[in-house]
Amino acid sequence: MRHDRLPDGFGVRIDPRVRAFSGGRILIGGSPARMLRLAPEAAELIGDGYLEVTDSKSATIARRLLDSGVANPRPRLEPSLDDVTVVIPLYNNADGLVRLLAVLRGHNVIVVDDGSDEPVRIPPRQGRGQVTVIRHESPLGPAAARNAGLKAATTDFVAFLDSDVVPRSGWLEVMLGHFSDPQVALVAPRIVALDAESNALARYEHTRSSLDLGRRESAVHARGIVSYVPSAALLARHSALSAEGGFDESMQVAEDVDLCWRLERAGWRLRYEPAARVAHDHRVAFRAWFGRKLFYGTGAAPLGKRHSGLVSPLQVPTWTVLASLLFATLSRWGLFGGLVTLTTALLRLRRVFTELDNPTRIAAVYLARGYFAGMWRLASAMCRDYWPVTLLAVLTSRRIRKVALTMALADGLADWFTHRDAGGLDPVRYVAYKRLDDVAYGTGLWLGALRARSFEALKPSMPPR
């Protein structure tokens, strides 16, 4: 584990989703959620929610806040753009490469032609920023192509951009600042849609692309809300990736997830920075879109073999599952049993908050949030990861059919309501695409498990305490 000190001038701000109690000495939030107790002196330093590093004591407090997930970094220093090499893995996408290079003028670029049918030829450039081409005579895969660019780069930082993306203005500067923290190995931007309007599927992808991790900044943790970042656009510390061997070249899918989790296990910090944006040319033809979603699903099985216990499609507390199953019986005894289960969970949670004012009310609020969040995760898993099991149950039981259809519709409509302002798609088509999206991914998940002869990626698990 590294213990490099945060530099003076580095700032951290408490995340707006975090709740403070007892005069700021107790913070509840983060991902996974936790309760953080601070000494009075530390709480006083944070003050209105912002802490600037000025000495070793404030650096220690800032590091603890960051590692607990209750605060986000506000760096003031950043490396030079000259310290960055852009690596572009390429396979049969000459048009995309031309489009991308047009916005990378002034940057040093390494294009790794991974066995394209027609070898790439780059016209000479004028001014700053040169383009170098490395060619593989036969395709070795995107991981191998990125590793080839990593080995050829001589700068401290390497940006990986797929040939079907277009960075927005300021994308690199926003991410570079995070590397003033010497323990940060990787930062990723938000992936947005390049085409958001051409058809209904484009509008859905603009809203719910698998690559778009949302508008909230976050640390990247295997068990957090942002558990990984996609390799379509990444900025990494050269020494950190080299020390970990780069991308796993044996993986044709989910190699980005594997890299994130290996870096985290090695003690590095990773960040998701949505203020930096990179547009991606999403697949908006149905067959290609469905096939890609299915392909993503096949990556869970190889991940399960490499990272046992981290790939579970469903992490919900036992009490949430039990209460939901009892309520789903739609019987008087089921209702009674569900209420008893929730009451028991409430009493256990209340003991955690005994030192706070109104512990019962606080416990009830967090219990309600946890229960409804868990119930939606159950509904999502029924329609996505476990849809073959749900289908069999629906065909054999009228009661299950009623519950499953209600949950599938409610989950889809809730998701549409949450994202209704983003894509402008009506609820009927949105829910239809959402369910097809889930079926495609879930099908890939089961196919991958069958091919690997391992069901590790399908096992539900308990969330960490």
Image (cartoon, rainbow, N blue to C red):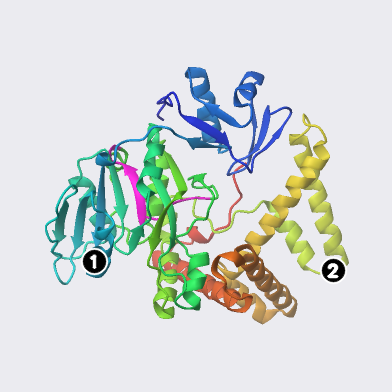
Quarter location, residue 279: bottom left
Q: Secondary structure at mark 2?
A: loop
**In the rendered view, would you say 423 is above or below 374?**
below
Quarter location, residue 116: bottom left
Give the position of the C terminus as an image quadrant.
top right
Frontmost residue, 48 versus 323: 48
The magenta stretch spans residue 315: no
Q: Residue at x 67, y 51 (%)?
A: 317
Q: Position of residue 364 (x, y in %)?
A: 79, 46
Q: Residue at x 53, y 70 (%)?
A: 438
Q: Secondary structure at mark 1?
A: loop
Q: Nearer the viewer, mark 1 or mark 2?
A: 1
Q: Report which residue position mark 1 lands on.
A: 91
Q: Residue at x 30, y 42 (%)?
A: 241
Frontmost residue, 317 versus 246: 246
Residue type marked 2: Ser
Q: Position of residue 315 (x, y in %)?
A: 60, 54
**305 displayed left or right of 215:** left
Q: How many marks overall?
A: 2
**458 displayed left or right of 21:** left
**In the rendered view, would you say 197 is above or below 318?**
below
Residue type marked 1: Tyr
Q: Position of residue 114 (x, y in %)?
A: 20, 62
The region drawn magenta spans 226-239
**In the rendered view, would you say 180 is above or below 56?**
below
Q: Report which residue position mark 2 lands on.
A: 331
